[in-house]
Amino acid sequence: MFVNTRVRCRVHNSPTMARSWGGLLAPKKRMALFLGLLLFAVFSIVVYTTANSRLERENEMEEMIANLHSHLEYLETQYRGRQEDVLNLQSKIYVDRGNGSTSNQVTTIDLTTTISPEVTALLKNMTGSHAANGVYTKHLAQLRTPFVYQLLPHLMNDANSLKPAYHMRGSRTYADIVIGIPTVKRDKESYLMITLTHLINGMTDEEAETTLIIIFVGEIDLEYVVNTARQIENTFPKQVEQGLIEVLSPSPTYYPDLDRLPITLGDSRKRVKWRTKQNLDTMYLMAYAQSKGIYYLMLEDDVITKKNYIAEIKKFTAATTVNNPTWFFIDYCHVGGIGKLFRSADLLNFITYVQLFYNNMPIDWLLESYLADRVCTIEKSSKACVEEKLRIKPKFKTPLFQHIGLYSSLKGKIQKVKNTKSGTIPTFYPHKNPPLDYVKTDIEEHADHTLKRAYDGQTFFWGVKPRKDNLVEFWFQKPIILERYLFRSGNVEHTSDKFYDTTVEVLPRSYNSLANFTAVGYFDEFGLAEGELKMGAIVAIRLKVRRNSTYWVILSEIELKEINRPADTS
């Protein structure tokens, strides 16, 4: 019994023990497998991280080398500029020797800006400010641009034509990025302070130390220039003191006679004058800025920017230079001439190109034309040309700058853009005008947008499709002498509802017949009619339509300014 029992026990317990040993071995195998997989994963992560780290370091090194290369190009242009100074000095020495003068004789010419009594009075209240010091340009150097006198011969009429008439500057002589902003008197509204606020708030303190903002005031009215500089200094005193902001304005003789420019592209004279002056302003600003920093950022005076735009520009520019070192400009805004970043070393060639064609087309067209001349040949197809142009003007993924200007620097032109202010955009502009006897028009008035309410500044006049010989008349209570008139048609909501082919006519007091209305002006391509009246008293002023219109018409502004003296009652 005992033996059988043992045998039965052994036979009965064998599977159980096998399962027990198997149960003990399985976790060890699983543990070993898990540890093996863990070690493999750790090894893979280490290898991957090391490779990524090495790749990141390589990318950083490549970007650093690209930045150093751009810096070297900038230094080379400065070196060539100094060489030019040496050559000019040598040439002067040789000329002096040829004239029998001694080497220690130096001739100086004291050229100063003529300051009007109004500006002198203005400066007395600004003593000690940077804005006031900007008028003393005696020791400023002439701008240096290639072939400038041959291409712009009017500059030879005045030895001071390339010397700034005004320059509010700090001590900053070098920057990573120079931001160039041309500005002029705008119709209705200036956006310059909004633009500067966004630019300054969008950069860190460290970035502000390596950036320079140059405001170019393209006006010959020195009082306006000084007031603009004073407003900038009062608004941004810290930035002016630190040298972040400069204000620059050219000599009046820098500009040619804009009324004698040849008409090109079938444009109106008004548009030709505007775009030609814009090109001249761009040239001057670029010529000054090219020696101030490695990169030049082309902006306008009516933009806002995204936060950290300087960091984004530096990062993308460095990466682009590694992958595409032959770029000419990088587009950080896809509108016109806004947000274009150049290497300062490349500006000289483009300035020369603009000098050649400054009267031919607008600056953004000149940019495209210059790119085509650089990379397109007669043999290339249009498609290949477009591809080559895109290669040398890479675009940032999303625009860093947004255009906000409602009123263009071209007077009368209204641009439909996003408004940055909390209020609504005005659809009309009221004025206090001379009292009327009555108004009348044979253009059908829409709803309560009557001519009388528009004249009184309560709304805008809105009429249904003017026809040929329709009239809009304003008859005064008594004869008056007008100094100037302004009629603006269209508004931001209805930019096409303008007066087309319409004249402004007045009736002198000395005539009683309606046949004696005299034309004194007309509505331009932007729906604006304005002018000065140099005549005696008048009894009425009217608008006369010369052809049928396919659009309705809006009068959003009526301004009749009476001269500041009693009307002649004799």
Image (spheres, rainbow, N blue to C red):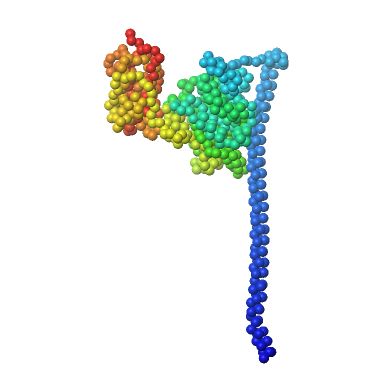
Image vertical order of residue 36 relative to residue 298, above or below: below
Q: In which quadrant will I find the N terminus? A: bottom right
Instruction: Please provide percent x and percent y for residue 358.
Output: 51, 28
Q: Nearer the viewer, residue 177 or 193?
A: 193
**Left or right: where 453 falls relative to 129:** left
Residue 440 in sight: yes
Q: Residue at x 66, y 73 (%)?
A: 24
Instruction: Please provide percent x and percent y for residue 536.
Output: 36, 13
Q: Residue furthest front?
A: 2
Q: Residue at x 66, y 88 (%)?
A: 5
Q: In which quadrant will I find the C terminus? A: top left
Q: Residue at x 61, y 27 (%)?
A: 241
Q: Nearer the viewer, residue 452 or 331?
A: 452
Q: Nearer the viewer, residue 92 or 115?
A: 115
Residue 153 in sight: no
Instruction: Please provide percent x and percent y for residue 208.
Output: 60, 34
Q: Residue at x 51, y 21 (%)?
A: 224
Instruction: Please provide percent x and percent y for residue 166.
Output: 57, 21
